[in-house]
């Protein structure tokens, strides 16, 4: 199991990035980065209070690269039918709805079926999930997803590369186990640098 320190580990890969409508642009490590998102949880304020108590505060443990998000000092347990994942990182700031992001391999370990691949925030009809914290439990009828791989990019760089928000692009990662990821969704973001987010299954596949 990954340590908390591995929650969002940046690793830099050489390769050719082949955007839709733009022929195989030769981007180098100076042009984009790939970050691996290990399993993590975004909480609503109400669910945070249920899990950690009314007096608890979410403290920034580490700033992340995108949209002012951060790893907090808090962790929760994701409850499965086969086993649980303990010490799962809670990211801030608060969301309007609690969202749990896992990899497909995680779903097998938990014993949870039919966790859909979704963009962040698209939770309608997603998988139910139970979370445990030091002060209580939350049972959510929906909220667990496998995150759709995506490219965070700011408006200036979108213009530079001729991309539009929501567009799918493909990205070839040129490691020893080179592979091309299709359907990498462009997300206009507050980010200083184009950043591809893969989950642990995707990232491990090209290590
Ligand atoms: Zn992301």
Image: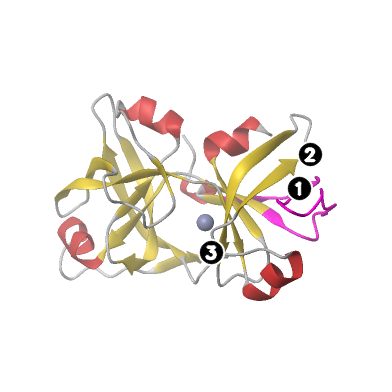
The residue shown at (65%, 39%) is 181
The residue shown at (54%, 59%) is 166
Q: Is residue 119 above or below residue 61?
A: above
Q: CA distance from mark 1 to mark 2?
A: 12 Å
Q: Residues within 10 Å of mark 2 (few under 14, many from 20)?
A: some
> Which residue position is annotated with label 3?
64
Circle 1/circle 2 CB separation < 8 Å: no
Residue 175 point in image, percent of width and height: 77, 36
Q: Which mark is residue 49?
A: none
Q: Is residue 82 magenta?
A: no
Magenta-highlighted residues:
9-33
> Which residue position is annotated with label 2?
174
Instruction: Specify which label sits upstream in the sequence, 2 or 3.
Output: 3
Q: Is mark 1 within 8 Å of ligand 1?
A: no
Please, which residue is most extreme toward the bottom here?
156
Q: CA distance from mark 2 to mark 3?
A: 25 Å
Callout 3 secondary element: loop
Looking at the image, residue 118 sits to the left or right of residue 134; the answer is right
> Which residue position is annotated with label 1?
18
The residue shown at (73%, 50%) is 12
Please, which residue is most extreme toward the front here?
21
Q: Is mark 3 within 8 Å of ligand 1?
A: no
Q: Nearer the viewer, residue 145 or 110?
A: 145
Instruction: Specify which label sits upstream in the sequence, 3 or 1.
Output: 1
Q: Is residue 77 above or below residue 163?
A: above
Callout 1 secondary element: loop
Q: Residues within 10 Å of mark 3 (few under 14, many from 20)?
A: some
Mark toward the viewer: 3 or 1: 1
């Amino acid at each position: 199991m990954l340590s908390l320190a591995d929650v969002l580990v940046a690793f830099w890969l050489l390769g050719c990035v082949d955007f839709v409508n733009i022929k195989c642009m030769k981007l180098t490590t100076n042009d984009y980065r790939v970050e691996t998102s290990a399993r993590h949880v975004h909480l609503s304020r109400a669910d945070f209070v249920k899990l950690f108590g009314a007096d608890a505060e979410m403290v920034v443990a580490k700033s992340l690269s995108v949209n002012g998000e951060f790893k907090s000092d808090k962790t929760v347990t994701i409850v499965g039918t086969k086993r649980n994942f303990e010490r799962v990182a809670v990211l801030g700031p608060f969301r309007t709805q609690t969202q749990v992001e896992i990899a497909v391999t995680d779903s097998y370990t938990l014993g949870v079926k039919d966790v859909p691949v979704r963009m962040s925030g698209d939770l309608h009809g997603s998988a139910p999930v139970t979370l445990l914290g030091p002060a209580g439990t939350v049972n959510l009828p929906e909220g667990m997803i496998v995150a759709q791989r995506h490219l965070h990019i700011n408006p200036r760089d979108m213009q530079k590369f001729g991309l539009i928000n929501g567009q799918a692009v493909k990205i070839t990662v040129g490691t020893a186990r080179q592979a091309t990821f299709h359907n990498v969704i462009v997300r206009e973001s507050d980010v200083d640098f184009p950043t591809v987010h893969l989950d642990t299954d995707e990232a491990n596949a090209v290590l």
